[in-house]
Image (cartoon, helix red, strand yellow):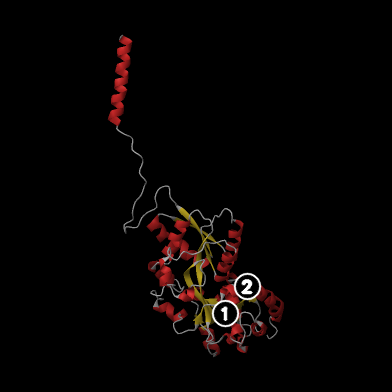
Amino acid sequence: MKKRNLLLTVLLGIMLMLAACGTPKVPEANTSTDNGGGKKAVSGEVKEITVAGNGGKIEQLIRDEIGPKFTEETGIKINYVAGLSGEIYAKLELQKNSPQIDVATFTPGDVVKAGNADLIEQVDSTVFPNLDKMDNKYIYSDKGVPIFGYTVGIAYNTAMFEKEGWAAPTSWNDMYRAEFKGKTAYPEVSNAWGHAAFYNLGMANGGDLENIDPAIDKAKQVAAISDTFYKNSTQLLPVLQQETAAISILANYVVTDLVDGGLPIKMVIPEEGAPLQSLTAVIVKNTPKKEAAEQFINFVTEETSQKIVAESGFYPVLTDVSLPENIEEIIGISDAKVYTPDFELIAKESENWIERFAKEVVPELGKGL
């Protein structure tokens, strides 16, 4: 009897303790908002995305300026992987079945290639409302969203030109003016800048994207007054900075960097026109972080981010955002003839151009010096 009473007493004590503790609560998701009301990342959701793109100024702009602001607003960190556009394309091919990159930024040719190879997602325009606010000249594919605008033109050292009494260049045909012998710093055709100069030089002389014979003929004249062609900006830019070359082919954002570094240089959009294009953000096929990738691209194309883009020497892709006045004077295109090339056709013809350039143009280097 005593044992039974003792057992009842113990059971009653346990029941009273459980009642005092109450019903256990399910842990709530850890959410918060920033000071501006933007939603922070939810605990257990995406904490980081990987963005792959060019190094140099493009890397600095995303990694150091736009990326931290995106993280502050969303809580999602940016892991930036730097590489040339073609190198990033190769990574997407290798990682096709298990992507490690969520967003890639490509030059136009590689957007076309990646789209044709089914490595990137189709753009859903309803997800990217800023597309409706963009200059249509930057939009050339339904597989990506333009983020940084740029063009390629003739850049020249204003001090050297003034000293020599040379007239400023106005045409693609000024690339092979006789007085520039030994003073050129031109990229070869496999380089994106040299590539653009090549087909524009051809079109300025009656050719087109499928008939490049005029481009070959004129490029031979360019080669004759040149010591060499440069494969990339790492080789080319020091020649300009040392002022051993007076004229080159550059993208606008590089020109602004050189000016900031104290070089007296200016870019000209040739009278025949220049290709207006964009660094384009694409979402990698089968990324498990698609929504976060879309969120990042939308952030980069918002007005606040595009103002940072403009201040960095790129052309803003939104029609309502303008270049700062001091940068407009150096790389402005308001009165210039710019156009959107047929990048599908260019991608198709490029290998042939590179092959012919190597066989027919490169052997002419220095023959006119």
Above or below — where is 358 with respect to 52? below
Image location of residue 354, percent across then percent down: 66, 74
Q: Which secondary structure lies at badge 1?
A: strand
In the picture, measured across the screen, residue 8 lies left or right of residue 108, that is left
Image location of residue 92, percent across then percent down: 58, 59
The residue type indicated by label 2 comes to Lys
Q: Are marks 2 and 1 in contact (CB under 8 Å)?
A: no
Residue drawn at (53%, 83%) of the image: 273
Q: Which secondary structure lies at badge 2?
A: helix
Quadrant that contains the N terminus: top left
Residue drawn at (58%, 79%) of the image: 197
The reply to whether residue 353 is visible in this rendering is yes
Residue 26 location, quadrant: top left
Quadrant that contains the C terminus: bottom right
Image location of residue 309, percent across then percent down: 43, 70
Please tell me which of labels 2 and 1 falls first in the chain. 1
Above or below — where is 63 with respect to 257? above
Above or below — where is 222 with respect to 306? below
Residue picked out by circle 1: 248
Residue drawn at (63%, 85%) of the image: 181
Residue picked out by circle 2: 348
Q: CA distance from mark 2 to mark 1?
A: 26 Å
The residue type indicated by label 1 comes to Ser
